[in-house]
Amino acid sequence: MADQRLATCLWFDGGAKDAAEFYCALFPDSHVKRIDTAPADYPGGRAGDVLTVSFMLLGSAFMALNGKEKNDFTDAVSFQVFTETQAETDRYWSALTANGGSEMACSWCCDRWGIRWQIIPRVLMEGLEHAEPQVRARVFAAMQEMVKIDHAVIEQAIAGI
């Protein structure tokens, strides 16, 4: 990680390796760079336990840390993933909400480790950033009715259908 200028560190309660491997398998341009084990016992574990996992996620640097106690993730931080197609949106959404994850609202979901994600179709952003206020209003209203974003409904809102 020393070659990075900025990295995100995620604190897990023993699930760092599983989470990093799951994310890297799910998203393109992602891979585990390094898994480090504790050289000695520490407050959260024993010598030889996985301590940190350095990984690249969608081209960005991350570290997963197995901390000494559970620190819950909150809505105050989320990761936005921009998608091109409904199939891509559906794939990420299904994987992140499976096995104890949950749906939230307006493109937000929570994975089984409690990390918040926003799976955002680019068409949604195009509509929300449209030059015409009435288009932005229609897209915003449509989005507010959704949990997982439906590309076709957003395209219809942009078109005024």
Image (cartoon, rainbow, N blue to C red):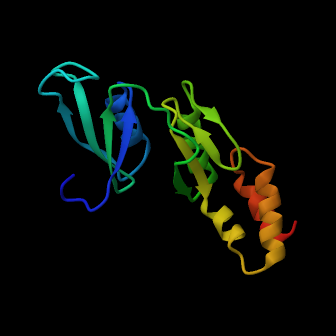
Q: How many marks?
A: 0
Q: Is residue 135 left or right of residue 61?
A: right
Relative side of 90 to 51, left or right: right
Q: Could you say where residue 146 lies in the image, as x and y percent from the top left?
A: 76, 47
Q: Residue at x 29, y 23 (%)?
A: 44
Which residue is depicted at the point 78% across and 63% down? Answer: 139
The residue sitting at the right extreme is 161
Tell me the quarter of the picture where residue 160 sits.
Answer: bottom right
Q: Is residue 120 above or below residue 11?
A: below
Q: Residue at x 27, y 38 (%)?
A: 53
Taking the view exactly as shown, the residue that stands out farthest to the left is: 39
Quadrant position of residue 141 = bottom right
Image height check: is 4 above or below 17? below
Q: On the picture, is 85 further left or further right than 131?
A: left
**Residue in front for this viewpoint, 65 or 30:** 65
Q: Position of residue 113 (x, y in %)?
A: 48, 31
Closer to the camera in the image, 35 or 123 = 35
Q: Quadrant of the C terminus?
A: bottom right
Horizontal relation, residue 23 to residue 134: left or right: left
Q: Position of residue 122 (x, y in %)?
A: 60, 63
Q: Residue 133: x percent and y percent?
A: 80, 77
Measuring 73% from the left and 81% from the top, which residue is drawn there? 131
Q: From the viewer's side, name the closer residue of 92 and 38.
A: 38
What residue occupies the far front of the structure in this picture? 43
